[in-house]
Image (cartoon, helix red, strand yellow):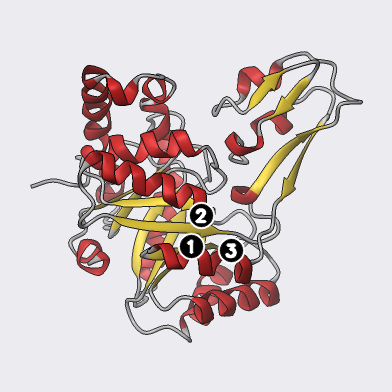
Amino acid sequence: MLEDLLKSRKCFKLVCGAGNEDAEEVEKLVTIYSLAGCSFFDLCANPKIVDAAKRGLKRAGIEDNRYICVSVGIAGDPHITKAVIDQEKCVKCGKCKVLCPHDAIIELDKYKVKKERCIGCSKCADNCPKNAIDMVSEIKNYDEILPEIIAKGIDCIEFHAISTDDFDVMDKWKQINDLFDGMLCISLDRSVLGDKKLKERVWKMLECRKPYTTIVQADGIAMSGNNDEYGTTLQAVATAQLFQNANMPVYIMMSGGTNKKSMELAALCDVYPHCLAVGSFARKIVKDYLIAADLFENPQKMAEAVDIAKSLVEIVVKD
């Protein structure tokens, strides 16, 4: 069971991307990382992506003791935003295409965003010299999308509660609780709330939950884990420490800027999370294999990709 995996503190979660709707890539990611020893997979709340992940597990031949989580967000949450390029302002300088870590920008008559690949990191918008790119939230109706996804068989729903709107957070949290009686995850960072407010919010959200039926995802800086440095993962460790010291009846998961240095730095700070979630860095180190058209037909390429992924997963999943 997922609870047993979390209790073991040997839980590695692959974050495929809350905004990643590229089914082919998700199938490849889940296949590679499942073979590498990963047992927990975080997906966007899209039935087709859940199907893709299940195909990946089937390809790996390891469907038992593998757990699927889907992520939903709230207005303002970067995980559910998509880049939109204003064609009137775009001067086709190409800077956005070069900077995009997920190859979501394509060149046609002008540069356009391939929405299914955009994960909302905002690197393009932050660096556009003409301010031609906006980040737009894509809010999904939980009552419409979650029942179909739940029926497919999932193990957890992750709620990105990054907002200053307490009423909206609690309203959507109630919706999720009413729809799903399994493990829930609350994802929070320090981008808009201070430490005191973060703890108050989580305690309030836990009022309707039984002890240890909730994961708190302590996010550092979302979608920032593109390198393997201590500084990149520092905020994730600090946020996890905040929740650990609060002695909440929850499982703690580190995410946001996480990499191979995360568990080492956490141990130096006496922080012991139940799970390490890695997204940007995990996807980056196998990127060359994700774009290989023959990955599933080429055992050598698959073995190479699995070995690379295993070097990351084994930081948590040790004998």
- Mark 1 and mark 3 in contact (Cβ < 8 Å)? yes
- Residue 248's place in the image compared with 75, above or below, is below
Residue furthest to the right: 88
> Alpha-carbon neighbours of circle 3 within 10 Å: few (<14), some, or many (≥20)?
few
Q: Amino acid at mark 3?
A: Ile
Give the secondary structure at mark 2: helix
Q: Nearer the viewer, residue 181 or 151?
A: 151
**Disc with the residue nearer the chain's start (1 vs 2):** 2
Q: Is residue 261 visible?
A: no
Q: Which residue is mark 3?
A: 145
Q: Nearer the viewer, residue 211 or 40?
A: 40
- Mark 3 and mark 2 in contact (Cβ < 8 Å)? yes
Q: Which residue is mark 2?
A: 47
Marker count (numbered): 3
Tell me where residue 232 appears, x and y as whole percent: 45, 37
Tell me where residue 132 appears, x and y as whole percent: 83, 29
Q: Which residue is mark 1?
A: 149
The image quadrant that residue 233 belongs to is top left
- Residue 59's place in the image compared with 206, above or below, is above
The CA span between labels 3 and 1 is 7 Å
Q: Is residue 52 visible?
A: yes
Residue 207's label in the rendered image is none
Q: Is residue 149 left or right of residue 73?
A: left
Q: Amino acid at mark 1?
A: Ile
- Residue 13's place in the image compared with 303, above or below, is below
